[in-house]
Amino acid sequence: EKGGYDYFMLKEIVEQPRAIADTLLGRLSVGGELTLDEMRLSAQDLRSVEKIVIIACGTSYHAGLIAKYAIEHWCRIPCEVEVASEFRYRDPILDRQTLVIAISQSGESMDTLMAVRYAREQRAKVLAICNVNGSTIPRESDGVLYTHAGPEVGVAATKTFLTQLAACYLIGLYLAQVRGLKFGDEIDAVIAQLATMPEHVEKVLDTVGPVRELARSLSDADTVLFLGRHVGYPVAMEGALKLKELAYMHAEAFAAGELKHGPIALIEEGLPVVVVVPSPQGRSVLHDKIVSNIQEVRARGARTIVIAEEGDESVRPYSDVLIEIPAVPTLLQPIVATVPMQVFACELALAKGNDVDQPRNLAKSVTVE
Ligand code: M6R
């Protein structure tokens, strides 16, 4: 059942192009209108939304952080993202005009479920993004958009994360559509690009070989830092989480702009630093700033592992290892940039002899608060 792989996680990483394609199937129409009929929320419900609050845990929380960038940019609706376990304890401001999006792969995380119940008591509308049909969170929500990743056995979320991203993009584009925001060229281009993401992920999977060698060479490192900006920041957080849970290593992500406010003091000779570089075409200011950050940490002895768009030659002189990913619109980059991080954490954990499907102390779904 592992399809010839030693671990489910390896199989699930490879299944990602199919998982994304299945999640987009029948919902995305290039050059036309999106169809999210089964969502159970009416266009009228969505038109009256004044604020969005996303709640989730772990990897699903990272998907939420990325969704915020997309939703605010495309829909111009204020969007907050919060770790579900913190949500109801701070007396959040919710009302009928608030759309709460609860992201949960399993649909059973108790922290997220409790936050959903709280939000509904406060009269907010709740939309779940979930991978398990008929699980508790979608049953208790007003609407649901299912991801079609298929069963994920490995404790570490991989294909479900990429499909959560696809679902978040669909919701953002759909909201823009039902609210009558003019579909400008940018939105049309994004829809067309979203449809091609399965191929792009396939390409990344075909080219990650060097990541495996790199990971094996770093199995003695004590700590790995991850840097990103914009949507690359939550991607860096996801890379660090994967390394913690699979390789039991200290890993931490920073927004690259925060480096100079403290974390740069951590940099020392040989410290591996993984950097997610924004596209030079998209937000070029951010691109140039992060290139300076790479230079700064390298000048202090860091070993730089750089994930950048193919053809971005500006980073090559400062990269000890350069991992190229396909050029896609900035907001969609997390789909391709996450994949080398998953492979990196998985291979590093395997090099340490860890069971990547069943890491110590963890359960696939956390049904206690
Ligand atoms: O099933 P959920 O999406 O609600 O689970 C949330 C987290 O427990 C989960 O993403 C966890 O962080 C994963 N093990 C990460 O790989």
Image (tube, grey):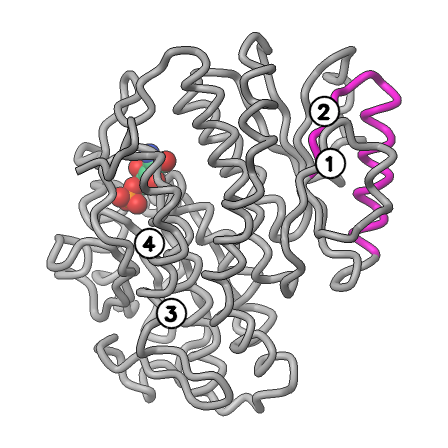
The span shown in magenta is 285-306
| CA separation in Å, label 3 and label 4 | 16 Å
Residue that mark 1 sits on? 258
| Ligand 1 image-quadrant field | top left
| CA separation in Å, label 1 and label 3 | 31 Å
Residue that mark 2 sits on? 263
Q: Amino acid at mark 1?
A: Glu
Q: Quadrant of the C terminus?
A: top left
Q: Quadrant of the N terminus?
A: top left
Magenta segment, prevailing SS (helix, strand or loop): helix
Question: Mark 3 and mark 1 in contact (Cβ < 8 Å)?
Answer: no
Question: Mark 1 and mark 2 in contact (Cβ < 8 Å)?
Answer: yes
Q: Is residue 292 left or right of residue 218?
A: right
Q: Position of residue 58 (x, y in %)?
A: 39, 38
Specify which label sits upstream in the sequence, 2 or 1: 1
SS assignment at label 4? strand
Viewer-side residue, 42 vs 213: 213
Q: Which mark is residue 98?
A: 3
Nearer to us of marks 3 and 4 is: 4
Q: Amino acid at mark 3?
A: Thr
Nearer to us of marks 1 and 4 is: 4
Q: Position of residue 37 (x, y in %)?
A: 26, 82
Tell me: is circle 4 under 8 Å from ligand 1.
yes
Residue that mark 4 sits on? 103
Instruction: Examine the structure image and report whether residue 43 is included in the region drawn in magenta.
Output: no
* Residue at image point 48% right, 27% down: 345
Q: Amino acid at mark 4?
A: Ile
